[in-house]
Amino acid sequence: MNAIQRRRQQERDARIERILRAALAVFSRHGYHLTSMDMIAEEATLGKATIYYYFRSKEELLSALLERGIDETLAMLEEKWRRCADPICKLEAIAYVAADFFSRNPDYFRLYNYLVMHPSLAPKILPRLMERVRQKVLRISALLMELRESGLMRDLPVEDVLFIFGSMVMGLGNVFRAEDLHRILHRRAEVLNDILLRGILKTESNSEGGE
């Protein structure tokens, strides 16, 4: 890629970022249903034709926003995991990464929840989102299996632990805006990890009980 191509790619990426930020702002203020492409174009200070050049519909914009959120979260988690030496550290990192993401993107959960509850959008968009996280979910499942096989984890169904843990982590996003949102969410992530690890890891008492 030569200098001209790089500049064009940078301009394209910047324009897409501008559109996505505008869409998130308008969706957050008015909700998905009441938002129009005209409103997004006005927020982005771009022509509506430019919006449609990159995104054919509101549905594509919503999907792109949610996919970007997932990609950002997974990249943050991968970075944290590089500094972890054991499965427990990696499991604890998940809640803290979610807390960091939701504190910077407090409207993400609302959009995701809207999608999940929407009868026509969910079947179209959710499979694409789930495919994006599938490999990471498999790795988290492997961490739990490693703990159980090493004798550190109680004999609990990994699939059920994974589902409950995932629901708890997503629940961190169900917050109202606050000036100290980052501190609040990190405190809740700490509590979440305490609940999870106390619940699934063996202690002297439950080891003696045969679990």
Image: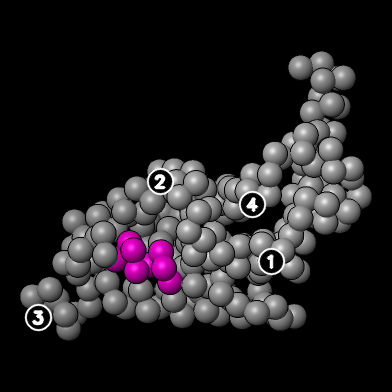
Q: Give how far across and how far down residue 130 sits, in percent.
A: 44, 48
Q: Where are the magenta residues, as a range?
A: 161-168
Left or right of 150 in this view: 188: right
Q: Is residue 162 magenta?
A: yes
Q: Which residue is mark 3?
A: 209
Gap between marks 3 and 2, in whole Å? 35 Å
> Could you tell me which residue is drawn at 66 percent across and 69 percent down?
106
Gap between marks 4 and 3, in whole Å? 50 Å
* Mark closer to the observer (1, 3): 1
Q: How many marks?
A: 4
* Mark closer to the observer (2, 1): 1
Q: Give how far across and how far down residue 150 sits, in percent.
A: 20, 58
Q: Earlier in the sequence, mark 4 or mark 3?
A: 4
For mark 4, give the secondary structure. helix
Q: Which residue is mark 1?
A: 31
- The reply to whether the C-beta atoms of the residues labelled 1 and 3 are less than 8 Å apart is no
> Could you tell me which residue is drawn at 66 percent across and 74 percent down?
182
Q: Give how far across and how far down residue 45 sits, in percent.
A: 91, 50
For mark 3, give the secondary structure. loop
- The reply to whether the C-beta atoms of the residues labelled 3 and 2 are less than 8 Å apart is no
Q: Which residue is mark 4?
A: 62
